[in-house]
Image (tube, rainbow, N blue to C red):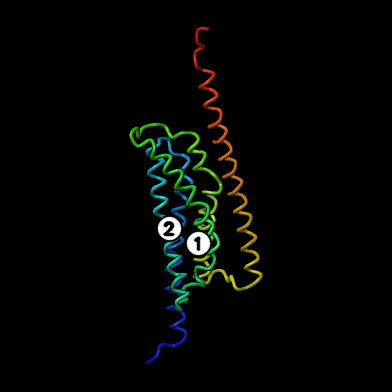
Amino acid sequence: MCASPVWASLDGMGTDLALTTVIALAALGAAGLVDLLPRATTAAVLRRRAARLQLLVGGLLAVLAAIGVAGLLGYGDLMPAVLPLWVPALAVAVVSVRRLGRVRRGAAAFATAPHTPAPPGLRAAAAHPLLALPIQVIALAGVAAVLAAAGLVALTVPAVLGAVLTVAGLVVTGVGVRDALRHSRLAEGAVAQPERLRLARPVGVL
């Protein structure tokens, strides 16, 4: 006996919800980790966090890329469910991944002295908005995708979509300002530290 359209719809909704939930959890984990990145107290902690974040972001992008390839091959049933994540995922792939790699390589340079305090310059780089914000935005998009897959938010309705985009824009602006202020504070500290060290040096005998 053929399954009724209602059951088929429920089954598709369940698949979409499960997929988007897993992706959203991974994206939220990445957003939490990128927020902790500049708070690392030692180079070893910074390196570990950067490595974990690279794995998490790489896995997330790989899943989204696999869904995209499946869509190109004609298996595009899951593509609408993850549609809100495509643009931030592209930003993560183009902007954040490269900066994250530089932070990890910079921290790895202190591998022989794992207890070395995390250099202020590296912490500032880890707090850069172009590294953090795309990852944080993809987490917000993942939450929106889960709400849409669960039927709680109808993104296909123009009025609802407009309200969601407005709220998302305000949240992203607030997060971006916070990231920019933190980066600016850490960058100022990175510039001020060499100056303090220079002034603290004893004056040689003329």
Residue 12: x %, y % from top left: 45, 77
The residue shown at (62%, 59%) is 167
| Numbered marks: total | 2
User: In this picture, is 136 found above or below 109?
Assistant: below
Q: In which quarter of the image is residue 114?
A: top left
Q: Nearer the viewer, residue 138 or 158?
A: 138
Residue 8: x %, y % from top left: 44, 83
Residues tagged 2 and 1 counted as in contact (Cβ below 8 A) = yes
The residue shown at (49%, 46%) is 35
Structural crowding at the residue carrying mark 1, measured as other residues with C-alpha within 10 Å and reported as few (<14), some (14–19) or many (≥20): many
The residue lying furthest to the top in this view is 206
- Regarding mark 2 in the picture, which secondary structure is present there? helix
Residue at which label 1 appears:
142
Q: What whole-number distance in Å separates the C-alpha atoms at marks 2 and 1? A: 9 Å
Q: Which amino acid does label 2 sit on?
A: Ala
Q: Which amino acid does label 1 sit on?
A: Gly
User: In this picture, is 31 found above or below 5?
Assistant: above
- Regarding mark 1 in the picture, which secondary structure is present there? helix
Structural crowding at the residue carrying mark 2, measured as other residues with C-alpha within 10 Å and reported as few (<14), some (14–19) or many (≥20): some
Mark identifier at residue 190:
none
Residue 170: x %, y % from top left: 63, 54
Mark identifier at residue 26:
2
The residue shown at (44%, 62%) is 23
Quarter occupied by the N terminus: bottom left
The residue lying furthest to the left in this view is 112
Residue 22: x %, y % from top left: 42, 63
Q: Nearer the viewer, residue 158 or 48?
A: 48
The residue lying furthest to the front in this view is 206
The residue shown at (52%, 39%) is 124
